[in-house]
Image: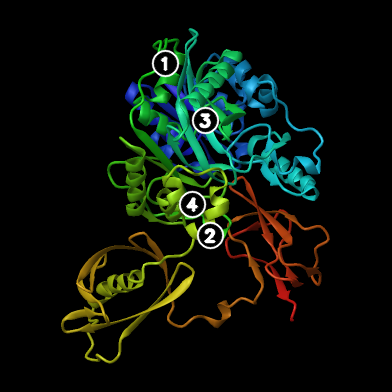
Amino acid sequence: MISTLLVANRGEIACRIFRTCGELGIRTVAVHSDADANALHARTADAAVRLPGAAPAETYLRGDLIVKAALSAGADAVHPGYGFLSESPDFARAVLDAGLTWIGPPPQAIEAMASKTRAKRLMGLAPLGEVTEADLPVLVKAAAGGGGRGMRIVRRLAELDAALEAARAEAASAFGDGEVFVEPYIEHGRHVEVQILADTHGTVWPLGTRDCSLQRRHQKVIEEAPAPGLSDRLTEELYALAVRAARSVSYTGAGTVEFLVADGRAHFLEMNTRLQVEHPVTEAVFGIDLVAEQIRVAEGHALAPRPPHARGHAVEARLYAEDPAGDWAPQTGTLHRLAVPDGVRLDTGYGDGDTVGVHYDPMLAKVVAHAPTRAEALRRLAGALERAELHGPVTNRDLLVRSLRHPEFARARMDTGFYDRHLAELTRPAPDPLAPLAAALADAHGRSRFGGWRNLPSQPQVKRYAMAGEEHEVRYRHTRDGLTADGVRVVHADARRVVLEVDGVQRRFDVARHGDEVYVNSARLTALPRFPDPAAQLAPGSLLAPMPGTVVRVAEGLAEGAAVEAGRPLIWLEAMKMQHQISAPVTGTLTALHARPGQQVEPGTLLAVVQETSS
């Protein structure tokens, strides 16, 4: 029996495993990098061991250090979570060789399926060889790992070499393995997968289907179970293929077999020999704890002959610190507040006041809703996200809410190109016009206690805010009757809550302020000085770092004075294990180039200036 378990991972998955272990009476051990010294998973575990350094290659990808940490902390088992070393057969062997219990499939099963190229051959498939124009479009894909890293769509043959180079670099950084391959890219397919659970006694459960078609950068954003709209025939075919894949490698534990479904046909993608980020939707529908089942399997227990019955529908949304309207750029900073209403499940690796840093994936949390029907689950999740308190970096919350309510998604007509088609409309600013007024009145309430009333009704107070990329000026007055604003009746105002009435309808606004950042319901505003500093103005054509990160590359031959065309890639940044391309905004002349390979930059750092060619 397992008494003490170390989780070789971080973030929400580590916290989620610790929660299950607590319920099972198992003591827990966390490992943490220096960047995660005060992270929630390190604070939650019964014991924690430091991995010196911050980058994954120095810490969470160091299997030798993790095994040493398990032994020094007295653990008798290791759970890899997902990502990092979860699909490393060498790490699994090292754990077993140290006399520890491995919460996962046998190393030989991982080895057979960990490389997507080997997995395809095992299923009777093969990647493309030499690519020709007739093969386009194609997908360049990392052979190891997942999460959308090391993947590039290529639509023009001239772009293939650059895509291969970028994918190799990204895969090596994320997984320690730069092998990539090329396969046909199916434009309008659905990403459907089957959760499996297998024991050491020969039983394999296919635990339903999941649809994970809503993706950005080939990384899932919204997942649901069961996958809607599949025929019984196709569902049974998917189950059979998933069980066949598991049996072909004598699989044990939890795993996922992924497919692309198009025109009623299933195309095998890969088998993930680990727990998936989206496993909570399966847990909700089948009423089981997959982590607890993993532990039971590792302890030698047998599964029942048949899986439990599925009930209802579950939907999960991944809440990221990123800007969908800004090329999905990851965001960093202090997460002042993260809370969701009752009635949904929240899996997170962050607590209020924690810092969202640059070293790891920008996912803040997973929010999951379960209901009797799909429509009810979508409504419940959208409502919970809309009312969630999110104070800190920019997130994809609004995108998630709009996606869940989009007619195409509501009718289950989506595919992996959903965001290619709809991103512009889903990220179009729709600011609440009353939010700046509510922010100003809440701020004024605090100041009014110190003699804010003035006998100058003709002189309104003025506040300025930035919201959704635009500036808003607000005017209000202190009167004998309290705070007033033209056209709006102020029913109530204090530092945390404002109630306004317009045309007989009262609306409540919850307000929180952290420095210059103000949060009004789901709106995020920045308080601006009344008179802008002229020195803060930037030259037209200035290229600023959209996030903290490292300059990994500058376009070959690029120098001040060079002529550049609009859209030409100039600089590449790496942040949160992803590469981000910065291109010329206009056609013109590069008048300044400050970026240098290896340079660490903060958001807003001036990288270059392109002066537009006059017409």
Q: Give yes or no for contact between labels 4 and 1 (Cβ–Cβ under 8 Å).
A: no
Residue 578: percent from left, percent from top: 62, 47
Q: Is residue 443 above or below residue 582?
A: below
The numbered mark, 4 or 1, whose residue comes first in the sequence reads: 1
Q: CA distance from mark 2 to mark 4?
A: 19 Å
Q: Which residue is mark 1?
A: 296
**Circle 3 residue:** 193
Q: Quadrant of residue 568?
A: bottom right
Indicate the position of residue 449 as horizontal and vertical percent values: 22, 75
Dot 1 alpha-carbon crowd within 10 angstroms: few under 14, some 14 to 19, many 20 or more: some
> Which comes before the other along the chain, label 4 or label 3?
3
Front tag of 2 and 1: 2
The amino acid beneath tag 1 is Arg
Name the N-terminal-most of marks 2 and 1.
Answer: 1
Q: Which residue carries the number 2 mark?
A: 424
Quadrant of the rendered structure where residue 94 is?
top right
Residue type at the position of mark 3: Glu
